[in-house]
Amino acid sequence: MIPDAALTQTGLPPSGQGQILLIACGALAREILALKAVNGWDHLDLHCLPAILHNHPDRIIPALRDAVAKHRDGYADIFVVYADCGTGGLLQAACDDMGLRMVPGPHCYAFFEGVDTFAAKGEITAFYLTDFLVRQFDAFVWEPLGLDKHPALRDMYFGNYTKLVYQAQTEDPALTAKAQACAARLGLAFERRFTGYGDLATSLASVKPPPPPSA
């Protein structure tokens, strides 16, 4: 199993097996691979860009364009497993320009919970973590914000938040305990919601294998 640190910094190369390439955020690798396995989606191959791009939305589109240019000739189609992810609509525009479909929604927190359900909650004072982000909390939150060196900055960053919502993709008591610890470190109330794979499963189920060539 590929380590989380590798998914964060380097991503996951495609296997070369499958007719349709999924280009996804490394933070979704385990969920996508689990869905592929349980559903027998052998027509899908997976290429993950480094998950740390989550912290640098301006770098997602150039990385996506490079991946598409590199791999497009090897697959019948490409499907982009990113939501908007802080790009302000530019990722959708880039996908439209390249003739690619992508997962709908503002970010992965929305499609794990269900885009419509997430929007209806309107939680503007909640800070969200997924399974991957709980495991990689230091790499994505604590260290990039400088809280490892300057913990007094915590209240400046998180003073307007009221709770940490852990969107659990799996039933893992150890991961729940770690998420609770993350909430305590941020000085926030804790809420756990089991989401499973949410709209991610539905979106990937829509990516059908290409029809066989006509005789």
Image: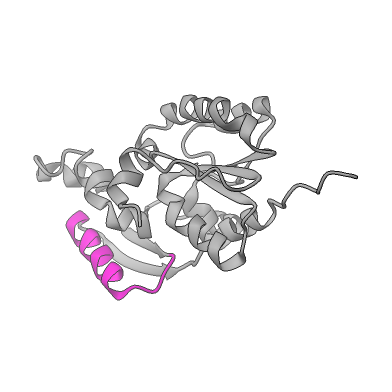
For the question of whether residue 117 can be seen, the reply is no
Q: Choose between 152 and 142: the one closer to the eye.
A: 142
Q: Quadrant of residue 100?
A: top right
Q: Is residue 141 above or below residue 90?
A: below
For the question of whether residue 60 can be seen, the reply is yes
Seen at 46% across and 36% down, the residue is 86
Q: Count how many numbered circles sit on residues in the image.
A: 0
Q: Is residue 203 above or below residue 140?
A: below
Q: Quadrant of residue 57?
A: top left
Q: Choose between 46 and 187: the one closer to the eye.
A: 46
8 in magenta: no
Q: Residue 107 in the image: x percent, y percent?
A: 49, 46
Seen at 55% across and 42% down, the residue is 16
Q: Quadrant of residue 21?
A: top right
Q: Is residue 23 above or below residue 2?
A: above
Q: Residue 47 in the image: x percent, y percent?
A: 49, 42
Give the dominant element type of the magenta stretch: helix, strand or loop: helix
Q: Residue 101 in the image: x percent, y percent?
A: 66, 39
Q: Choose between 191 and 2: the one closer to the eye.
A: 2
Q: Residue 146 in the image: x percent, y percent?
A: 16, 38
Seen at 9% across and 40% down, the residue is 149
Q: Is residue 188 above or below residue 155?
A: below
Residue 85 placement, left or right of 115: left
179 in magenta: yes
Q: Choose between 107 and 25: the one closer to the eye.
A: 25
Q: Range of the magenta residues? A: 169-186
* Quadrant of the rendering where the C terminus is positioned: top right
Q: How is the image coloured?
A: one colour
Q: Can you name the residue that lies furthest to the right here?
A: 215
Seen at 26% across and 71% down, the residue is 174
* Quadrant of the rendering where the N terminus is positioned: bottom left
